[in-house]
Image (cartoon, rainbow, N blue to C red):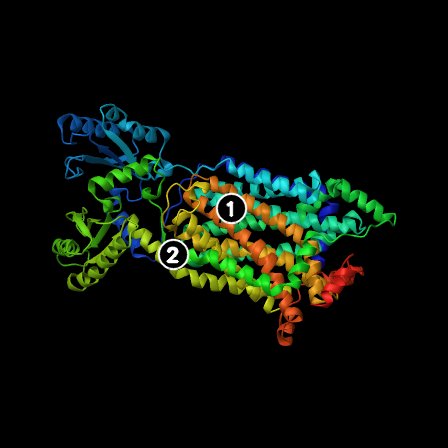
């Protein structure tokens, strides 16, 4: 592989104008497709194989006029102190508003009258108007939303409190200025790392081109493939981070080759042949982790994973082709002023004695105290992981919104007036097609549900025109995300099994609350198979890269430690509220069900990035004849500065999404940023060298039968070095006197 990539790098460098033209043309083509595509709607949320989804599909089939997948809203009214919503003046005002809503938009399917639908609280203080729409929330026009927002203005003038809940007010997520700050921090880190504006700007430019192509393609295909609004946001988040990192490693290796006196084209070829091999395998681990999300069998999550994986593939291809082409345009300016002076001095034979850099000094410290470093790292992450034991998962509703929003205030008004469970009613669907007496079966279902503890109200069954399906609305006592409400759902389903055996009628429970319960259960069931698939495939991939059994095992265990610690931090901030105000968390609550498995997938891929980039340099040094301890120092001398910069950049990019208005994006941005911090600086920079120091030569052990079985992909470039007949890089195979004395003791 290294030889092929070497030739590819040289070709891209020589034909840089054609390579640049191809990528610019692809960007323009994707941009044109995105600009000409129709506006994306929200992705349809479905959970195949669950009872809630089966009931929802049955409703759409048997009640075609009910707009089951349409947006909904509740306009909630609270009477002034001393008055009731049944007072003639208040009643007239509410009826007037209901009439205005009906005539306000042709997208409205129905508007209920609270005084005939029983939507007035027992004490008369609160009432609400239910509004159903023919289309989903993302397809609502601005005029329709404005009519909804303006509905209560006249009522507020008369002293009533008016708030609006439901998903009709849901809009595309907004991202904050912190995204721009994240990219700016990345630029500063690159300038500090390289000491050259040209070298710093190159990874940013190529990463933005890659993200532009990826996100534009997603936008162009959003309607065709039914992609949700968060798909492009997450693809941008991951694509930008890995795009900068992959280009950073290629540029860094190119500068190192130039510093050793290589010609520019030769340096580009060697950079792509060596660092490019690490980029390919690091990218493959990320792609495996993202594509593996399809194991969960939830279309929305699978599409997010595939879209993000596509952006990663583009980032890898750009690193292997466009980056060496851009290096050809940059010329010697990519080196920076200090580096150019050092090279001239070396060419004149005045090479000064190199001082150990920070990476070298840290590696030597770890080699002296490996047990202590290992204990501190493991115990520290273990302590941070403790809150993960209290992880509660669910999907957000209006109760998790900030108290400043009208949706949250409407949620609270309904809870106060009608009870907490009123915000998450259950929809029970009774399929009587195979029952001899459908009405009797539906009545039996209603009676059974009324006797279940935790149920406060059961509406009479409503049959469709064909008379073969009935809908029953059940109001639980407790809030939608409570354990008590989950128990009610399970109790209804258990009683439905007996009813089916007695009457032949099938009882199904759906609604947003039941959907959330089924979704969380599916996430829990899929986590272990997903981990087994992703970790197993990546383990095999890393065995190919490192030709070792213990190094991939250590990499996987280190990842598990960092991801559990990251989950602990997420629980502490978003569920317990620790430092919540610092990260813009206005309302604590359960952790979103899809967040842990998505974080596991993404963080595993990114964790393997640092493992591959750092340890391949150690493997390269070991293969070229260095002792195990000396190889660790060499790996850190050449890779620690770049890996540190890459981690800081990735953290900055992810942290930029904490400013998003959407809770899911905010939570994922925080979790990825903190996970990268733990994995890069604690696991890869401390625990990994400590374990390798303790293992010594055993770290690179591979059974002979397995060595013969595994193909040699030559990531460390040994085959390339033999083909080119080059000597080991400067600094490899030897160290300064002090380093040799210290390593002799290891």
Residue 435 location, quadrant: bottom left
Residue at 64% x, 66% y: name it: 693
Q: Secondary structure at mark 1?
A: helix
Q: Position of residue 217 (x, y in %)?
A: 52, 43
Q: Which mark is residue 257?
A: none
The residue furthest right is 348
Q: Relative to 55, is 667 on the left or the right? A: right
- Using the rendered view, name the quadrant where residue 154 is placed: top left
Residue 306 versus residue 105 in the image, above or below: below
User: Residue sitting at 67 percent across and 48 percent down?
Assistant: 321
Marker count (numbered) = 2
Between the C-alphas of marks 2 and 1, the distance is: 30 Å
Q: Earlier in the sequence, mark 2 or mark 1?
A: 1
Q: Position of residue 613 (x, y in %)?
A: 64, 56
Is residue 299 placed above or below 536 in the rendered structure? above
Of labels 2 and 1, the one closer to you: 2
118 or 431, which lies in front? 118
Residue annotated with mark 1: 235
In the displayed structure, does residue 567 sit left or right of residue 312? left
Residue 617 in view (yes/no): no
State the mark number for residue 390.
2
Q: Dot 1, how many residues are within 10 Å of its Cα: few (below 14), some (14-19), or many (20+)?
A: many
Left or right for 19, reference 55: right
Percent x, y of residue 676: 54, 52
Which SS class for mark 2? Answer: helix
């Amino acid at each position: 592989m290294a030889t092929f990539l070497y030739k590819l790098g040289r070709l891209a460098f020589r034909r840089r104008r054609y390579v640049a033209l191809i990528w610019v043309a692809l960007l323009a083509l994707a941009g044109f497709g995105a600009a000409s595509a129709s506006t994306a709607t929200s992705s349809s949320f479905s959970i195949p194989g669950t009872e809630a989804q089966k009931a929802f599909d049955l409703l759409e089939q048997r009640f075609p006029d009910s707009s089951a997948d349409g947006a909904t809203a509740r306009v909630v009214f609270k009477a002034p102190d001393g008055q009731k919503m049944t007072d003639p003046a208040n009643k007239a005002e509410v009826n007037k508003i209901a009439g205005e809503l009906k005539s306000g938009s042709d997208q409205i399917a129905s508007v209920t009258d609270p005084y005939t639908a029983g939507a007035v609280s027992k004490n008369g203080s609160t009432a609400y108007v239910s509004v159903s729409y023919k289309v989903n929330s993302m397809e609502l026009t601005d005029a329709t939303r404005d009519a909804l927002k303006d509905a209560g203005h006249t009522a507020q003038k008369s002293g009533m409190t008016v708030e609006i809940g439901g998903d009709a007010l849901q809009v595309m997520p907004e991202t904050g200025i912190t995204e721009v700050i994240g990219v700016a921090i990345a630029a500063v880190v690159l300038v500090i790392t390289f000491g050259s504006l040209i070298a710093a700007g190159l990874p940013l430019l190529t990463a933005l081109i890659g993200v532009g192509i990826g996100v534009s393609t997603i936008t162009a295909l959003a309607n065709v493939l039914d992609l949700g609004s968060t798909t492009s946001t997450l693809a941008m988040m991951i694509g930008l981070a890995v795009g900068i990192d992959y280009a950073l490693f290629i540029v860094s290796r190119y500068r190192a080759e130039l510093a050793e006196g290589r010609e520019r084209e030769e340096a580009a070829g060697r950079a792509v042949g060596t660092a490019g091999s690490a980029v390919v395998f690091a990218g493959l681990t990320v792609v495996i982790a993202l594509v593996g999300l399809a194991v969960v069998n939830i279309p929305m999550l699978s599409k997010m994973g595939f879209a993000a994986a596509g952006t990663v593939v583009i980032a890898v291809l750009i690193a292997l082709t466009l980056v060496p082409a851009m290096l050809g345009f940059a010329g010697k300016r990519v080196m920076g002023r200090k580096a150019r002076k050092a090279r001239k001095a070396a060419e004149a034979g005045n090479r000064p004695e190199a001082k150990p850099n920070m990476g070298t000094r840290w590696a030597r410290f770890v080699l002296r105290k490996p047990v202590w470093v290992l204990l501190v790292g493991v115990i520290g992450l273990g302590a941070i992981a403790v809150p993960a034991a209290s992880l509660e998962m669910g999907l957000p509703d209006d109760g998790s919104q900030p108290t400043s929003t009208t949706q949250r205030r409407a949620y609270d008004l309904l809870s106060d007036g009608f009870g907490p469970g009123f915000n998450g009613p259950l929809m029970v669907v009774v399929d009587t097609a195979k029952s001899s007496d459908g009405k009797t079966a539906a009545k039996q279902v209603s009676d059974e549900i009324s006797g279940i503890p935790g149920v406060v109200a059961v509406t009479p069954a409503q049959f469709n025109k064909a008379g073969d399906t009935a809908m029953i609305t059940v109001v639980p006592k407790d809030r939608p995300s409570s354990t008590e409400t989950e128990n009610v759902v399970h109790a209804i389903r258990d009683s439905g099994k007996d009813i089916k055996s007695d009457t032949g009628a099938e009882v199904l429970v759906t609604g947003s609350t039941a959907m959330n319960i089924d979704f969380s259960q599916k996430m829990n069931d899929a986590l272990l198979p997903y981990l087994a698939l992703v970790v197993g495939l990546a383990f095999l991939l890393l065995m190919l890269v490192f030709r070792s059994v213990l190094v991939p095992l250590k990499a996987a265990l280190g990842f598990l430690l960092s991801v559990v610690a990251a989950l602990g931090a997420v629980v502490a901030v978003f569920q317990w509220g620790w430092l919540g105000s610092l990260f813009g968390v206005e309302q604590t609550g359960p952790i979103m069900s899809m967040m842990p498995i998505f974080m596991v997938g993404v963080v595993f891929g990114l964790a393997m990035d640092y493992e591959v980039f750092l340890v391949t340099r150690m493997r390269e040094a070991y293969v070229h004849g260095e002792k195990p301890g000396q190889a660790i120092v060499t790996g850190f001398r050449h890779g620690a500065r770049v890996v540190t910069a890459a981690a800081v950049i990735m953290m900055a990019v992810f942290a930029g999404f904490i400013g998003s208005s959407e809770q899911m994006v905010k939570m994922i941005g925080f979790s990825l940023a903190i996970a990268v911090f733990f994995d890069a600086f604690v696991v890869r920079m401390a625990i990994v060298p400590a374990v390798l120091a303790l293992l010594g030569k055993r770290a690179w052990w591979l059974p002979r039968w397995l060595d013969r079985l595994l193909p040699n992909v030559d990531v460390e470039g040994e085959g390339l070095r033999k083909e080119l007949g080059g000597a080991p890089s400067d600094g490899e195979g030897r160290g300064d006197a002090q380093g040799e004395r210290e390593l002799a003791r290891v």
